[in-house]
Image (cartoon, rainbow, N blue to C red):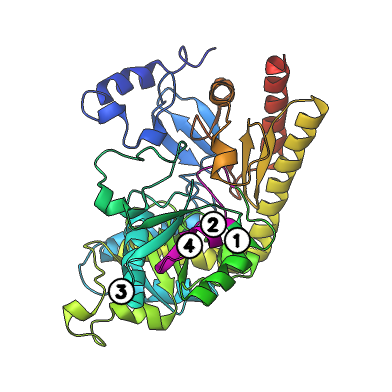
Amino acid sequence: MSYEKRTLKSKALFERAKKFLPGGVCYASRYFEPYPFIVVKAKGSRVWDMDGNEYVDYWMGHAAVILGHGYAPVIEAVKEQLDYGTHFGYLNEEAIKWAEQVCKWFPSAEMVRPATSGTEANMYAIRLARAYMGKRRIGKFEGHWHGGYDVLHKAVGYPFDKPASLGLTEGQLRDTVLLPFNNLEGVKERIKGEELACIILEPVMGAAGFITPENDFLRGLRELCDERDILLIFDEVVTGFRFPGGAQKFYGVKPDLTTLGKTVGGQYFSGAGAICGRADIMEKIDHLKHPNFWERSFHGGTYTGNALVARAGYTVIRELEKRKDEVYPYLNKLGEKARKGLEDIFERQGFKAYVTGVGSLFAIHFTEERPRDGLTALRTKNIDLTKALHVFMLENNVIYLTSTTSHFILSVAHTDGDIEKFLSLVEEFIKQHRG
């Protein structure tokens, strides 16, 4: 039965949603054609819509959900916390335990402050870097995504010279210097004569399809920042818990600051974000060391460090720590099986497509050349073929986002059988579109 015939309740409710939610959704990336189904339940690696259809989920809550939907230890901890209270507006023990656990996880984290989203974490991190360094301009990479904060909302999608959003002013963006990913010489050329407070990047480029750093690019960038007296910020909103110790430990490069979101708040809850890093930088926030407000970098937020999210986040990080010898080898094995399987299909079928990713993250690219940066990933992408793959998978009860970028994200709840079914569907799709 076709998607539209088996999702009649979702279709009706989506029509209702369009009357009250712009575009009918809470976030544009959650829309897909012909209309999004309405989720009512999630468990493990599956989600169910209101018509009772079951889907294998390769989006996993925007990559937040590593341990699977409905992971029992987190749910139990949250239920218990509900009896004590959720949002006090005061310091609580759960926030302190969470902070200790975050600092234990990341090699570069000496101190941490919570935020309520990855976007907010990046906003405060940029402000903190400027305050600490006494410089205004910042470096940001083409095609990298750091949320909706104005000064970072530049060159997100191709073409990079178009505004990433209406409502951004020239004044907000003029201090953001654009840099090329995986091109250290290009970075050096673009920052000549610049006095930058910081350079921020995703160590694994997420929005354009999990593109990994090449040829010691991160190490070279670290050395360049040291030479030029520039703070290096890793946006680990996606990668922070996809590797033990984050991408910074995986690649052996310590940033000065790290921004976090998603998993750090317990996989399922809002109010999830963090800024962590060197103590001397983080102390620029400290009101005890800097009692005059005009001598410190502001950080705050009504829901920052609320007991519910802190407890959930602490529980997830503790679970990942306890189970890391089981979780990460398993995730890496599944991811490698998917990547190698896809490459084998494209080679056997003589089909021009590329696979990127690392660990539990992978992506398919219908491009003219192997993606290595924002330009090569986005400039020649075959959008029609990319959308066709999404539709084909949807018809076969497999879901991921977005429909224009083929990201796939794994959890410990996924199985070898899930990957084998996924690969067989991709091969079927390629045979249909080979000519």
The location of residue 148, given as percent across then percent down, is 33, 48
The vertical placement of 218 against 157, above or below, is: below
Q: Secondary structure at mark 2?
A: loop
* Image quadrant assignment for residue 423: top right
Q: Residues within 10 Å of mark 3 (few under 14, many from 20)?
A: some
| Foreground disc of the pair 4, 2 | 4
Who's the residue at 43% across and 44% down the image?
156
Label 3, on which residue?
A: 131
Who's the residue at 25% across and 75% down the image?
91
What residue type is disc 2 on?
A: Thr
Verify whether residue 207 appears in magenta.
yes
Q: Are marks 4 and 3 in contact (CB under 8 Å)?
A: no
Q: Which residues are magenta?
A: 186-210
Mark number displayed over residue 243:
1
Is any part of residue 80 visible from this angle?
no
9 or 245: nearer the eye? Answer: 245
The location of residue 18, given as percent across then percent down, is 26, 24
Label 2, on which residue?
A: 239
The vertical placement of 364 against 435, above or below, is: below
Marked residue nearer the N-terminal end (4 or 2): 4
Verify whether residue 233 appears in magenta.
no
